[in-house]
Image (cartoon, grey):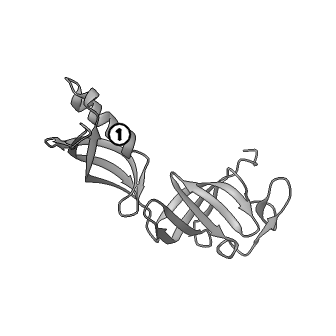
Amino acid sequence: MFFHIVLERNMQLHPRHFGRDLRDKLVAKLMKDVEGTCSGRHGFVVAITGIEHVGKGLIRDGTGFVTFPVKYQCVVFRPFKGEILEAVVTMVNKMGFFAEAGPVQIFVSNHLIPDDMEFQSGDMPNYTTSDGSVKIQKDSEVRLKIIGTRVDATEIFCIGTIKDDFLGVISDPGSTS
């Protein structure tokens, strides 16, 4: 799920960046440092949408660096248990498959894949229905449900299932449609 939240961060800036474009340099450094990172509490920072406030700088003793408190608005992505996501399969093996939904990697165990799907090994490992009509392989798009999340300080891991109504393959790169 995506959220628009306000966060704060203390940014250090080297004295060579001081001048008329100080604020622009500070915003550019903030975007470079923050966008694409993950905090366990808030999720993945997708984009900074605005700067609310830049506080007065505090000179660091001995270095000349200045620390500015910056309050900014950003869009974050945080998956929750029970959420339905569309993801792209990145790897298939006999234990299940891994899929990615944006920055989140999701594992779907073979116990959470419908019983009528069998693992097929070979040069392109996949899960196929007995009649061969549906195939899950690398680069397939699947709709899945998150049944569990584990949050670390810098990463979020998810377990998903496709063993439910309206879940499963959305598009198959191997099909000729």
Instruction: Tell me where residue 17 appears, x and y as whole percent.
Output: 27, 28
Q: Nearer the viewer, residue 62 or 77?
A: 62
Q: Residue furthest left?
A: 56
Q: Nearer the viewer, residue 76 or 33?
A: 33
In the rendered view, does 119 fall on the left or right side of 42?
A: right
Q: Residue furthest right?
A: 122
Instruction: Tell me where residue 170 appears, x and y as whole percent.
Output: 62, 55
| Identity of the residue drawn at 62% across and 72% down | 163
| Identity of the residue drawn at 24% across and 46% down | 72
| Total numbered circles | 1
Element under disc 1: helix
In the rendered view, does 33 fall on the left or right side of 133?
A: left
Q: Nearer the viewer, residue 162 or 8?
A: 8
Q: Which residue is mark 1?
A: 31
Q: Amino acid at mark 1?
A: Met
Q: Nearer the viewer, residue 65 or 80?
A: 65
Instruction: Tell me where residue 139 appears, x and y as whole percent.
Output: 67, 50
Q: Residue furthest front?
A: 62
Tell me which corner region of the image, top left, top right, bottom left or bottom right, holds residue 166: bottom right
| Identity of the residue drawn at 31% across and 48% down | 74
| Identity of the residue drawn at 61% across and 58% down | 99
Tell me which corner region of the image, top left, top right, bottom left or bottom right, holds residue 94: bottom right
